[in-house]
Amino acid sequence: MSFTVYVPRDTSAESVGAGAVARAIAGEAARRRTAVRLVRNGSRGLYWLEPLVEVATPGGRMAYGPVSTQDVASLFEADFLHGGEHPLRLGMTESIPYLKNQERLTFARVGITDPLSLDDYVAHEGFQGLKRALDMTPADVVQAVARSGLRGRGGAAFPAGIKWKTVLDIPADQKYIVCNADEGDSGTFSDRMIMEGDPLVLIEGMVIAAVAVGATQGYIYLRSEYPLAEAVLTEAIAIAYERGYLGADSRGAGRRFDLEVRRGAGAYICGEETSLLESLEGKRGEVRFKPPVPAIAGLFGKPTVVNNVITFASVPIVLARGAEYYSEFGMGRSRGTLPFQLAGNIKHGGLVEKAFGLTLRELLYNYGGGSASGRPIRAVQVGGPLGAYLPESQFDTPLDYEAFINISAMLGHGGVVAFDDTVDMGRMARYAMEFCANESCGKCTPCRIGSVRGVEVIDRMLANRDLKANAELLRELCDTMLNGSLCAMGGMTPYPVLSALNHFPEDFGLEARSAA
Amino acid sequence: MITQNKAMDESKSEVVREAIDAHRDRPGALLPLLHHVQDRLGYVPEEALPDIARALNLSRAEVHGALSFYHHFRRSPPGRHVIRICRAEACQSMGGERLISHARTALGVDFHETTSDGRFTLEPVYCLGNCACSPAVMVDEHVYGRVSAQRFDEIVGSGEPQ
């Protein structure tokens, strides 16, 4: 009899030794002449338990973790292949509360299937969305995406259906589907997890988009910092070609759709959609003026759908189960689920896909379990390096696009980075300006020069020089950047800076009252 | 002072020719072409720019402009291994700055420098997508998580990293 053992092939799991554990299990099995089928799945997203090893048992999958190579012999001794008792045994994977209490729609298959098995994908509801889409008119597909309430998951939260409709309605000899996989925000890794753990769902989402708007060429613009994602995606695309989901007549769509991965080159700004398009065209990644929007004049001047990985990866389930099914999740105008990423100084870091509406506090404590250091959580940055720092008094804000806008913050791509009480918020504000100075494309002055001046002003404040005058200057500078920048890089760098100044004035040497 | 011969040696120009042939007809060929060259040579030699520009019908200034825009591309050869340490917020929250100080001391170099034995080049990186296992370090193409000073020494200390 053969046993099936799962060891994730995911960057984070690999970063703490999953590859070595997989080799050790294969070696030990061979030594004991036991037939073990090793599946390199995606990560379940319970990163504090990685490397998380699972074994298929008649009652479901049994989890062990975190497993190191030294534990492998004792796992065999404990008969883990039959789910045997062991100090690292965590119980049935599906019953681990962190996982059990989630609402996994976009991540339904991640960690469960073999990412590179198309048959496994199909056996788990894969390509059902595409099948539905091919039975519908393009306008109906676009309408379904619009009715689901799905908004761009890259951060800007623009309704996907409206974008798609714009591209559908414009006659053009060539249209493009571009996936923004330039996941550069600190504290985010959900795109990576999809690309490494369920790449076919991204491909399916892009094929559906192509069918809906009449595009024949797609590109996935992937950051160069993700070599494993590139390897998995490239292999998945080859499999999709082989099985007729890409190429001449993508599964009976009646037209061609080609897809390739294009590697970025370490520029944060290329996550901005127009800069990304410039980069895809082989140029410096400088931001374009808008209008025209990319939906009208995008890649090589042609109508282009540009969406984030998670947006495309959420489309198949919208089509497969219906727009209403998806839109029943969430609150207000934030419909569906968001895969939140718990990161930084947090005890239980990982991926938590939930409907919009739970509070930051629930996420940090019910899932995250508080800080990793055991000290109080003092500040949380939500939405990447351009997102605001929130103090404890704002932890009860519901995770909803509009609720965050109301407190001058943003949900962005759903990254949540926790800091304990050793954090120096003056330094974090300085870092935000420094990052902007490093990564600015240089096209507009408020961003290019403002960020450099911002570092200088904060340096003066941290050296305790003319505190009040410099605080005022910093606010004026932020006002210029916010209102005068061409894109969110310069336009939102003031968010972390001002939130640090407003909520943590003491870290700048200011009294709470005089800072406001 | 003797300056280095501006002409590329045979193996380098062969790589550049191969990259040009592989990519020149693709839309937006410049980035894939530069990646191809750097993947093979470890950097993009200055001497390759005229050939690349000519092949893509671009000016040398355009090629230089793109090459110098992106942090990933290097214009001089790196050490045998490139160590990238994450400077972004999540890693900072877990002591990333201390790790960076340690790495600088341990290797005796600052960012963008190469150790005198030519083994390691140290670079900053802004997020490796490993933010739940901070601090993170990438050595060549392998990412390491939960890197303490001690683990850093183990990674770079004993033999060649994987």
Image (cartoon, coloured by chain):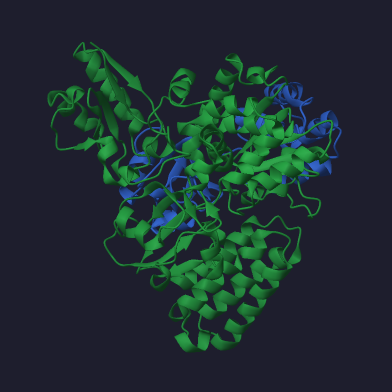
Drawn side of residue A215 relative to residue A88, left or right: right
Q: Quadrant of the N terminus of chain A?
A: top left
- Residue A449: quadrant of the picture: bottom right
- Measured from the top left, where is residue A476 in percent x and y? 66, 79
Q: Residue at x 79, y 24 (%)?
A: B25
Drawn side of residue A366 relative to residue A454, left or right: left
Q: Residue at x 46, y 24 (%)?
A: A121
Q: Residue at x 48, y 60 (%)?
A: A382
Q: Residue at x 60, y 76 (%)?
A: A457
Q: Which is nearer the eye, A255 or A373?
A: A255
Q: Which is nearer the eye, A42 or A361?
A: A361
Judging by colour alone, the chain drawn in blue in this rendered image is B
| Residue A220 visible at all | yes
- Residue B32: quadrant of the picture: top right
| Residue B76 visible at all | no
Q: Which is nearer the eye, A463 or A41?
A: A41
Identify the colour of chain A in the image. green
- Residue A6: quadrant of the picture: top left
- Measured from the top left, where is residue A276 in percent x and y? 69, 45
Q: How many marks?
A: 0
Q: Is residue A492 above or below residue A459?
A: above
Drawn side of residue A292 relative to residue A234, left or right: right
- Measured from the top left, where is residue A172 in percent x and y? 84, 34
- Measured from the top left, where is residue B68 in percent x and y? 71, 46
